[in-house]
Image (tube, rainbow, N blue to C red):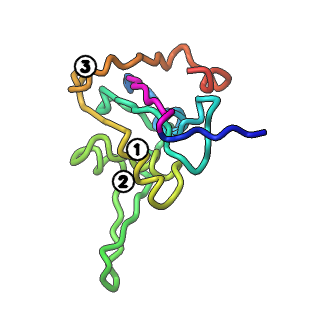
Amino acid sequence: MTKFVKNSEITCDWYEIDAKNAVVGRLATIISKIIRGKNKNTYTPHMDHGDFVVVKNIEQIKFTGKKFQNKKYYRHTGYPGGIKETTPEKLSEKKPGEALKLAVKRMLPGGVLGRKQLTKLKIYSGSDHPHSAQNPKVIDLSKLNSKNITRI
């Protein structure tokens, strides 16, 4: 019999990730699993019991290949002919963490649950952040591989 977790039984942890020399896509998969709660054995797809993730040093994040210059992000203004495009290079000048945020957002479910889970992602330039009072657990990306992601 499957046991479902109640809202009163949910506890949220805090994790801290240093994005220095991390690849955007690989980092986004790790973050999305933690935010959704897939690293817990009580994972339930329709409930939000994921953990908070603080990402620091976002300005030193990397793209593989020539994606930094060639990848395109599209958005629409809502007016006829209003499609706009930008590259990660231009996007990082204005908003350094937006490329990672978009990657994580596209890995989360659409709708109310996905939007609520995305608020658990905190992105900061530099190594300082205001969440040190939560005592976040540090995740070392250099020691992780695909097999250990579920055992964070």
Estimate how packed mark 3 is, as few (under 14), some (14 to 19) or many (20 or more) residues with alpha carbons within 10 Å.
Answer: few
Is 33 left or right of 78, judged from the image as shown? Answer: right
Residue drawn at point x = 58 percent, y = 38 percent: 5
Q: Which residues are magenta?
A: 8-16
Residue 68: numbered disc: 1
At numbered mark 2, what does the secondary structure look like: helix, strand or loop?
loop
Estimate how packed mark 1 is, as few (under 14), some (14 to 19) or many (20 or more) residues with alpha carbons within 10 Å.
Answer: some
Q: What is the C-alpha distance between the residues marked 2 and 3?
A: 36 Å
Residue drawn at point x = 43 percent, y = 30 percent: 12
Can you give x and y, in whole percent of width and height, for residue 102 in the image?
A: 41, 50
Q: What is the C-alpha distance between the residues marked 2 and 1?
A: 7 Å
In contact (CB < 8 Å): disc 2 and disc 1: yes
The residue pinned by badge 3 equals: 133
At numbered mark 3, what does the secondary structure look like: helix, strand or loop?
helix
Q: Quadrant of residue 55?
A: top left
Q: Amino acid at mark 3?
A: Ala
The residue pinned by badge 2 equals: 87
Q: Is residue 28 magenta?
A: no
Estimate how packed mark 2 is, as few (under 14), some (14 to 19) or many (20 or more) residues with alpha carbons within 10 Å.
Answer: some
Q: Nearer the viewer, residue 63 or 75?
A: 75
Q: Nearer the viewer, residue 142 or 12?
A: 12
Residue 36 vertical placement versus 132 (above, below): below
Eye-nearest disc, 1 or 3: 3
Residue 42 vertical placement versus 87 (above, below): above
Can you give x and y, in whole percent of width and height, for residue 16 in the image?
A: 38, 23
Q: Amino acid at mark 2?
A: Thr
Residue 52: numbered disc: none
Residue drawn at point x = 41 percent, y = 54 percent: 115
At numbered mark 1, what does the secondary structure look like: helix, strand or loop?
helix
Q: Amino acid at mark 1?
A: Phe
